Amino acid sequence: MKSDLIVLGGGPAGGNAALAAAAAGLSVVLFDEQPAAGGQVWRAPWAGKADPHDSPERREGDALRDALASSPVDLRFGRRVWSVGRAFRVDALGPDGNEWVEAPRLIAATGAHERVVPFPGWTLPGVIGLAAATVLLKSHAARPAGPVVVAGCGPLLAAVAAGILKAGGDVAAVVDLASARDWLVAVPHLASRPSLLAQGLGWTLKIAGRGVPVLFRHAVRRVEGAERAERVVIAPVDETGAFTGGSERSFEIGSLVVGHGLVPGGEVPRLFRAKTRFDRLRGGHVPELDADGRTSIAGLYAAGDGVGIKGAAAAVLNGTLAGLAAARDAGRLSESEWRKRAEPARTAAAGLAPFSDAIAGLMALRAGQVASVPAETVVCRCEDVTRGEIEAAAVAGATEVNQLKHFTRCGMGPCQGRMCGETAAEILARSLGVEREAVGQWTARPPLRPVPLADLLGRFDYSDIPIPKPAPL
Ligand SMILES: Cc1cc2nc3c(=O)[nH]c(=O)nc-3n(C[C@H](O)[C@H](O)[C@H](O)COP(=O)(O)OP(=O)(O)OC[C@H]3O[C@@H](n4cnc5c(N)ncnc54)[C@H](O)[C@@H]3O)c2cc1C
């Protein structure tokens, strides 16, 4: 099937990109592996799991889902995109097997994934990601087993702790890498989005109202337990995130929820070898874009957290701009009409910059965090590669992340480095005594997401495979 435009991702960025392009007259196909639009932040509850609590995110998500449902966009939810080929042929696995669409233009709005800087015990059952916990709370109306310690950095800490309390859970402590002063410095910038600041204050009051201790400038030292997480040990850190040697505290836990910010998921621009640059504030490598989301590859646009962590409000605006740019490039919008539609989004995006910078700053990786990972701790959990093995690979001659892959298999498992990639790259750079940029970025290749081969090839019996006759000697 052919279309004018394919949008990958039905979150705030992709959903709004599709709406803007369709309103300008393009035929648009939108793919997302989720069952409904909303992405990570505005995710819909799964069938039969309706979260009874109203929330601003729920309302924003419902508005996007309604707008898409009444638009001409061809919505392909429940489809896992595993390949994006030349001429923007997109292959996706859905309920009826593989399906493909081709278009002269494609907008990648595939969002971010979360970063957890490893510590001893981080792979034990009962340790779950901070961003992953939002999925439990929003889509499944489930909460982590208590008592829960919520640890890491950024605004999701308070959001998740308050969400667990609201769902009737027991939060033993909130452990924040940032200091109270870091937050006070951020507040004036966060005030540029008063509704979000008010939401954050609401979470803080809920946590304080339940008497939950908030330990600033602390981090998880280790998790102890035989079969699963039973106890978490935390300790004070300095402003770089390195442990200071101050006294440890421990909490008995049912779960540890922990996350250290987000990493842009730029697989599609990387697949096409679009120009990128390393941006520590924005979470890692980001594609180089013009003001409307065009990458260095003709016809390929990108928007949302996949092009650098800026949050949902910025994703809406960048998505809209990318959708309008695609329509303009396809000749469906005159210069004046494009200007009329794009100008409000551009102005609003510029106004959001202080807010976006402040939240990205609170989630950015600090140098001392990675320095604190013990040598025997597993970094790549898919392939069981430790920090010590990464350092040994550096000594043996690996000078760049894809060589690290060849030396150790780090980043070669089912998650394809989404979980460990940035930490492993930082460790390699530190071992070599170079800047993070110098060790490069992981190459992307299909399958972009793990897919069962049987679903692509159909069922077959080995005895049905014709065996060629042996060649004569
Ligand atoms: C797990 C997680 C939870 C988060 N929770 C919150 C939160 O509660 N509050 C908050 O403010 N911010 C949250 N964030 C940050 C939030 O994602 C962003 O600020 C915002 O959602 C960015 O919008 P986006 O449209 O760029 O990306 P997203 O909202 O992430 O949307 C991207 C979409 O692309 C789809 N997609 C990606 N790859 C494929 C593929 N190969 N095939 C098919 N579909 C694909 C995904 O299913 C997703 O729906 C979370 C981030 C993560 C990673």
Image: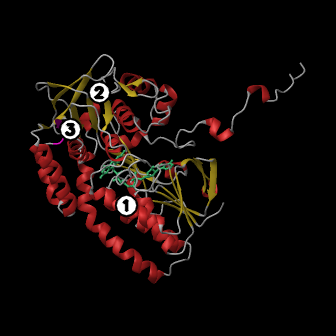
From the image, state whether disc 2 or disc 3 is nearer to you. 2
- Lateral position of residue 148 relative to residue 47, left or right: left
Mark 3 element type:
loop
Question: Do we see residue 292 in this rendering?
Answer: no
Q: Could you classify mark 3 by the number of other residues whose Cα lies within 10 Å: few (under 14), some (14-19), or many (20 or more)?
A: some
Q: Which residues are magenta?
A: 173-178
Dominant secondary structure (helix, strand or loop) of the stretch shown in magenta: strand
- Find the residue positioned furthest to the bottom: 336
The residue carrying mark 1 is 62
Label 3 is placed on what type of residue?
Thr
Q: CA distance from mark 2 to mark 3?
A: 16 Å
- Between 58 and 437, the one nearer to me in the picture: 58
- At 28% from the left and 45% from the top, the residue drawn is 364
31 shown above or below 427: below
Q: Quadrant of the N terminus?
A: bottom right
- Give the percent coordinates (x, y) of residue 224: 26, 20
Kindly check if marks 3 and 1 are in contact, taking CB atoms under 8 A apart as contact. no
From the image, state whether disc 1 or disc 2 is nearer to you. 1
The residue carrying mark 2 is 119
Question: Do we see residue 105 in this rendering?
Answer: yes
- At 45% from the left and 42% from the top, the residue drawn is 441
The residue carrying mark 3 is 240
Label 2 is placed on what type of residue?
Phe
- Give the percent coordinates (x, y) of residue 296: 50, 60
- Give the percent coordinates (x, y) of residue 434: 35, 37
